[in-house]
Image (spheres, rainbow, N blue to C red):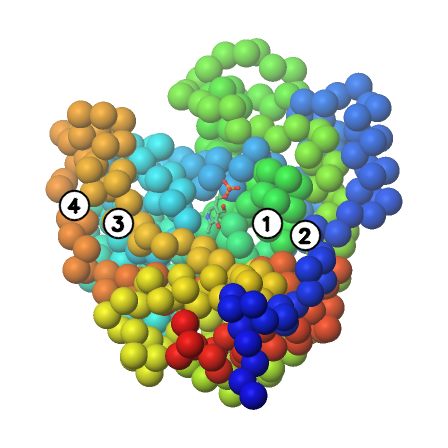
C-alpha cells in the first residue's frame, strides 16, 4: 500500500509542534536583556561596545562596529572601500536583494556575475570577464553559509587592484581553508536578524582589520560624525552619514546569543550530517555539497530537484512549489528562499533607484547591461530549489532531522501523484 500524502489526507510525517522555533531563549538572554532595560542607556551603550569587542575576538578581526542591520553593514563596506559615484561593483546574480542594492545606496552600479550551480555562490571563473576599468570592488556572498573560494577571489582582486567585500550575513562560523569568513576580504558584513545563526532580533556587524577602513565606515554609521557616542561628540556632519547604530537592548541580546554560538554551530553540523545521510538515496534530489577546503555552517540546507528526471523541466518552478506545498503538508518546514534572481528584480530592470535613472544615468557612470540571458545558472537554480533552516537548528536534535528527512522522502517517492 503506498503511503497517502498528507496533502491528500494522510498522516503528516512530522507531527505538529515537533519543530521548535529559533532561537532558543534561556536565562542568560533574559538576564542580560533585563539588565540593559534596567540600566541608564538604551541607545548605543555599554552592551554595544562590549558586543563589538566580543564579536571581533570571536571572529578573529581587529575591529567590529555593531549596526542596526546587515544591510547597513554592507553599505558601510562600500564606503570603507572608497566605492563612489559611477564605480562598478561585482555581485553574484543570486543573493538577497540588499547584497546588490547596497551599491545603489552609495551611488555605485552593481554588475552581476552568474553563479556556479554546485556551490550556488558566485562563479569565480566568471569574475575576470566582468572586471572593467571602473570596477572598484567585488561583493562575494557566502550563500547559505558555504564559503566562496576566497584564495582565488583574493588572488584575482589583488591582481586587478580591486577591493573584496564579504557578505557574510548568513555565514557566521563558516571557514575557508580553516579560516573564518569575514577575515579574508578587506571588510565584511554580518546580519543578526531573527533567522541568522547569531541572532539579536535585528542587527548587523561591520568588521575589518584596517584602521582607515574602520574610520570611513564609522563616519557613515553615525550622521557623518567622526566621534562615536562613547566619545564627546561635536554633532558635526563631516560627510554624508546615515543612522546605522545599534541599541543597547539588542546588543545585550546579541551578547547573550554569541555565548552560545559555538554550541549552536556544533549542533547544526551534527544535525546536518544526519539529515544529509538520510536523504542520500531519496529520488530526484540534488543535495548540497561542501567542497574541499570549505566548512559549511549549514545556515540554510538547500536542495534542488532533478526536474528532467521528474518530467517537469518545462514547468520547473511551478512544480517545485507543488513539491514544497506537499512537504509543508507533511510538517516539513521548507521554503523557497528567493524566487527571483537579482538582475530580474524591478529596481534593476527598470533602473529606478533614485528616480530619473539615477544612479545609472549619472554622467560619471558607464552603461551596464542587465539582460537576463547572462545568468542561466542562477535562473535554473532559482527555479528548482527549496531550503530548510529551523529543523536543523537547536533545540531541535537528530530526531527532528530524521522525521524531516522522512517527510521529504515520502513526498519524493510519491511525486508522480502530485
Ligand atoms: C546574504 C544576505 N545579505 C544581506 C542580508 C541583509 O541583512 P539584514 O536583513 O540584517 O539587513 C541578508 C539577510 O537578510 C542576507 O541573507
Query: How many residues crowd around disc 3 within 10 Å: few (fewer than 14), some, or many (20 or more)?
Result: many
Q: In the figure, residue 149 lies in which quadrant?
A: bottom left
Q: Residue 342 location in percent, x, y?
A: 31, 50
Q: Residue 115 location in percent, x, y?
A: 32, 64
Mark 1 vs mark 2: which is more N-terminal?
A: 2
Q: Is 341 placed above or below 211 here? A: below
Task: Write down the residue under mark 2.
Answer: 22
**What is the distance, in whole Å, between disc 1 and disc 2 at their CAs?**
7 Å
Mark 3 vs mark 1: which is more N-terminal?
A: 1
Q: Report the front residue among 336 and 107.
A: 336
**What is the distance, in whole Å, between disc 2 and disc 3 at their CAs?**
31 Å
Which-is-in-front pick, marks 1 and 4? 1
**What is the distance, in whole Å, between disc 4 and disc 3 at their CAs?**
11 Å
Task: Write down the residue under mark 1.
Answer: 195
- The residue at the point 18 percent across, 49 percent down is 370
Which-is-in-front pick, marks 4 and 2? 2
Q: Are marks 1 and 2 in contact (CB under 8 Å)?
A: yes
User: Which secondary structure, mark 1?
Assistant: loop
Amino acid at each position: 500500500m503506498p503511503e497517502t500524502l498528507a496533502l491528500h489526507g494522510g498522516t503528516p510525517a512530522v507531527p505538529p509542534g515537533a519543530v521548535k522555533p529559533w532561537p532558543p531563549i534561556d536565562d542568560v538572554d533574559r538576564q542580560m536583556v533585563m539588565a540593559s532595560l534596567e540600566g541608564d542607556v538604551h541607545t548605543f551603550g555599554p552592551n554595544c561596545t562590549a558586543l563589538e569587542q566580543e564579536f571581533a575576538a570571536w571572529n578573529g578581526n581587529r575591529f567590529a562596529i555593531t549596526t542596526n542591520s546587515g544591510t547597513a553593514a554592507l553599505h558601510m563596506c562600500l564606503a570603507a572601500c572608497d566605492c563612489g559615484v559611477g564605480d562598478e561593483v561585482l555581485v553574484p546574480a543570486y543573493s538577497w536583494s540588499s547584497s546588490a542594492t547596497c551599491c545603489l545606496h552609495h551611488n555605485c552600479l552593481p554588475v552581476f556575475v552568474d553563479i556556479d550551480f554546485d556551490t550556488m555562490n558566485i562563479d569565480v571563473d566568471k569574475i575576470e570577464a566582468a572586471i572593467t576599468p571602473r570596477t572598484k570592488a567585488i561583493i562575494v556572498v557566502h550563500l547559505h553559509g558555504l564559503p566562496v573560494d576566497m584564495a582565488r577571489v583574493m588572488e584575482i582582486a589583488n591582481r586587478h587592484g580591486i577591493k573584496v567585500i564579504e557578505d557574510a550575513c548568513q555565514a557566521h562560523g563558516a571557514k575557508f581553508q580553516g579560516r573564518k569568513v569575514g577575515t579574508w576580504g578587506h571588510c565584511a558584513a554580518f546580519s543578526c536578524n531573527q533567522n541568522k545563526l547569531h541572532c539579536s532580533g535585528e542587527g548587523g556587524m561591520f568588521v575589518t582589520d584596517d584602521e582607515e577602513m574602520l574610520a570611513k565606515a564609522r563616519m557613515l554609521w553615525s550622521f557623518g560624525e567622526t566621534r562615536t557616542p562613547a566619545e564627546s561628540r561635536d554633532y558635526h556632519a563631516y560627510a554624508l552619514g546615515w543612522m546605522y547604530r545599534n541599541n543597547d537592548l539588542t546588543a545585550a541580546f546579541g551578547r547573550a546569543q554569541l555565548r552560545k554560538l559555538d554550541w549552536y554551530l556544533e549542533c547544526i553540523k551534527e544535525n546536518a550530517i544526519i539529515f544529509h545521510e538520510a536523504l542520500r538515496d531519496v529520488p530526484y534530489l540534488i543535495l548540497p555539497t561542501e567542497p574541499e577546503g570549505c566548512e559549511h555552517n549549514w545556515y540554510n540546507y538547500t536542495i534542488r530537484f532533478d526536474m528532467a528526471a521528474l518530467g517537469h523541466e518545462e514547468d520547473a518552478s511551478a512544480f517545485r512549489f507543488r513539491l514544497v506545498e506537499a512537504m509543508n503538508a507533511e510538517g516539513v518546514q521548507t521554503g523557497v528562499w528567493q524566487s527571483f534572481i537579482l538582475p530580474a528584480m524591478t529596481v534593476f530592470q527598470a533602473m529606478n533607484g533614485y528616480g530619473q535613472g539615477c544612479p545609472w544615468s549619472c554622467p560619471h557612470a558607464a552603461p551596464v547591461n542587465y539582460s537576463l540571458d547572462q545568468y542561466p545558472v542562477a535562473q535554473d537554480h532559482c527555479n528548482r530549489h527549496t531550503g530548510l533552516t529551523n529543523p536543523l537548528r537547536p533545540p531541535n536534535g537528530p530526531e527532528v532531522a530524521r522525521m524531516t528527512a522522512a517527510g521529504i522522502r515520502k513526498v519524493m517517492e510519491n511525486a508522480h501523484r502530485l
